[in-house]
Image (tube, rainbow, N blue to C red):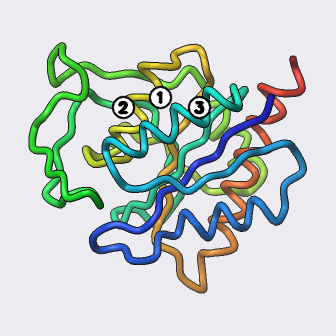
Amino acid sequence: MSSLVTGFGSFPGVPENPCQTVLAYLDSRRATEIVSRTLPVSYRRSIVELDKLIAERQPRFVVQLGVSAKTDVVKLEQFAYNIRDASIPDVDGDYCRAVPIRAGGLAAARQSICDLQELQRQLLSRGYQTVLSTDPGKYVCNNIYWHTLDTYPKTPSVFVHIPMLNDSNQQTVCETCTELVLLLDTLYCTAV
């Protein structure tokens, strides 16, 4: 069994997704058995690829990375919501405006089974700035997080929004995400 870390590729407005930089950093410093993959920013194809990876690898935990221009710090998303509602299309050209991901109403939410408050506490104690968030957006990030939490409720999973990278924050963001993965590995892999 391995662990799975995914990040998204480019999409309208983000020709180079910083998630790929974080995945490359993680790959170059891995100390555990981690499978990392870039997924398309597609409502449909990202889920198909994720399901295939989970079926093949049966990961002990899943970390999903997405970029948010609205943050300047690493955000641990506590919830995913049963809605797709974005003003831009995915890379396949699909627009989704106030569409439920799964029948049953727009207000339904799913929460990570990971103890994100404890993860944040441990990250902060090691000097890694993170915040807990209840707003994963309503684009493909929320879509894949909802799917993961809804379809694999017993698999520890967390969605992490990272800021756009620049010369002053790239190393810190990469190190923070790597430390998060190592902490999850300690919690969910060494105990088995």
Where residue 29 is drawn, which disc sits there?
none
Report x, y in % for residue 159. Answer: 50, 41
Question: What crowding class fits label 1: few (fewer than 14 Cα within 10 Å), some (14-19), or many (20 or more)?
Answer: many
Would residue 131 appear left or right of 128 to someone viewing this image? left
Residue named by callout 1: 148
- Direction bottom: furthest residue: 167
Identified at 87% across, 20% down, the residue is 191
Pointer 3 with pointer 2, Cβ within 8 A: no
Identified at 73% across, 62% down, the residue is 175
Identified at 87% across, 44% down, the residue is 32
Would residue 11 appear left or right of 121 to someone viewing this image? left
Element under disc 3:
helix
Residue named by callout 3: 117
Report x, y in % for residue 176. Answer: 68, 57
Element under disc 1:
helix
Question: What crowding class fits label 2: few (fewer than 14 Cα within 10 Å), some (14-19), or many (20 or more)?
Answer: many
Q: Quadrant of the N terminus?
A: top right
Report x, y in % for residue 74. Answer: 54, 56
**Mark 1 or mark 2, which has the lower sequence index?**
2
Three-letter code, disc 1: Thr
Pointer 1 with pointer 2, Cβ within 8 A: yes
